[in-house]
Every structure is written in C-alpha cells, then in structure tokens.
Image (cartoon, grey):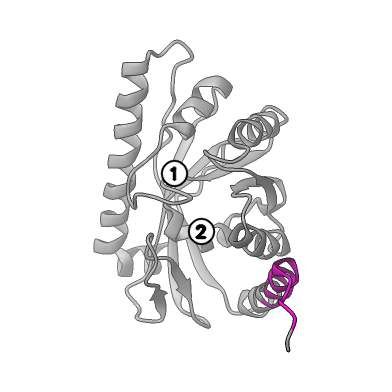
Amino acid sequence: MFKKIDKRYVVSVLSFLVKWFYAFESLFYNCKNINYPEQKPVIFALWHAHQCALYANKDRGSLNVMISKSNDGDIIAAATEHMGIKVVRGSHKRSGASASLALIEKLEQGESAAITVDGPRGPKGKVKDGVINIAKLTQMPIIPMTWYSPSKWLLKFDTWDEFRFPLLGVKTIAVYGEPIYVPSDCSKEDIEMYRQKLETALKDLYKYAEENFEDLIKNN
C-alpha cells in the first residue's frame, strides 16, 4: 500500500518545476513598458490576474511583492524570487499586519512595492483598501498598471481572477497610469474615495491599452 504523500514534498516539487518553467519562459518574454514611472519608490497597483506583468518591471531587484502564506503562495513565491523580485509573505487574513509593515519598511528604505489589489481571493476587479492605507502611511504614490495583449496566446485561465499567462514570445504591453497621492490626514470617507479612484483608474487604463494596443506597440 502506498504511503500518503507529504504535502510539503508536493509543494516543494511543484515550486521547483514552476521556477524552472518560468526561467525557460523568461527567455521569450516580450513586454513593452508604456509610461514607466521615473520616480522611485512607488507602489505599483495591479489586478491579481496580471502578476506576470511584473517581470517587465525595470527595477525588479528593488521591487517587493506580497504573496499569501499558503501552498499556492509557496509555489508562486518560488517563481517570483527566481525572477529577481523580493517577496514579503502574508495576506489580509494570514499574517497580513506583519506583511504590510514589512512592505512599509521597504518603501521607507527606498524600495518599491507591488500589490495585487483584488487579491488573494477576490472578488475580481474590486480594489481593497489595504493599498490606500499603505500609501497614506508612507506618503508614496500609487501607480496603477495594467497588462494587455489581444493575442490568443496570452492565455486566460478558468480561475477566480481569470489569471493571464503568456505563451512563448507573445507581444504584450504593461501600461502605467498617473500617480495617485493619498494625503496623510485623509478620513475613512476619503479612503473610500481614493479606493474608488484607483479602481476606476485601473479599469480605464485597461480599456486604453485594449483600444490603443497597435499604436502603443509601434510608437513606444
């Protein structure tokens, strides 16, 4: 009779496989940055489905991203670190406070952060207020960003977030919006206003990328 397989062993094997798959995929990664911010540090805000866009970041060595403390998170963290991006572990439910404090510390040290604003479990397309609170405390600007390609080879998975993954060489664009500054003295009502502002900015940015993809590829 087979012994029950240790879950930690399975996660370890999957992490290894995903890490090397991403290493191979990175040789063919084809993403053009549009309106990439010169100011640093900043807080990049993106949808959970667009995580692969972070590989296009010009400052990956000083970029920190929060990934949940879970088996799935262990696998994603292995791939993320292999791409040269720093990882802070936690989520809004598990070790969220300590992870947010770690991100704040990194921002204060002059490094940037990336936050999947509808993660880790959704609902899809709904900005949570964590990113607004971090921007308020650090006084660092939020940079909305989106990722797009009309190609069928930018795969869309049947997951809660409709996760995107590029097959070999597919042309994509990462488009960065105008900075959003959150005042240090804003009220709870103001935080909700900035949350809605960011949510609208991300949706408008995706629509802009969708409608202008060919021009953006040619002229940048």
Above-or-below relation of 100 to 69: above
Cβ–Cβ below 8 Å for labels 1 and 2? no
Classify residue 197 as left or right of residue 117.
left
Q: Which of 1 and 116 is in front in this view?
A: 1
The amino acid on which the numbered mark 2 sits, given as a three-letter code, is Gln
Q: Name the residue under label 1.
A: 117
What's the amino acid at mark 1?
A: Val
Q: Residue at x 32, y 73 (%)?
A: 150
The dominant secondary structure in magenta is helix
Image location (x, y in percent) of residue 4: 71, 77
| Residue displayed at 36% across by 63% down | 216
Residue ID at (41%, 76%): 155
Q: Residue at x 44, y 75 (%)?
A: 171
Judge whether 62 appears above or below 16 on screen.
Answer: above
* Image quadrant assignment for residue 10: bottom right
Between marks 1 and 2, how big is the CA–CA gap? 11 Å
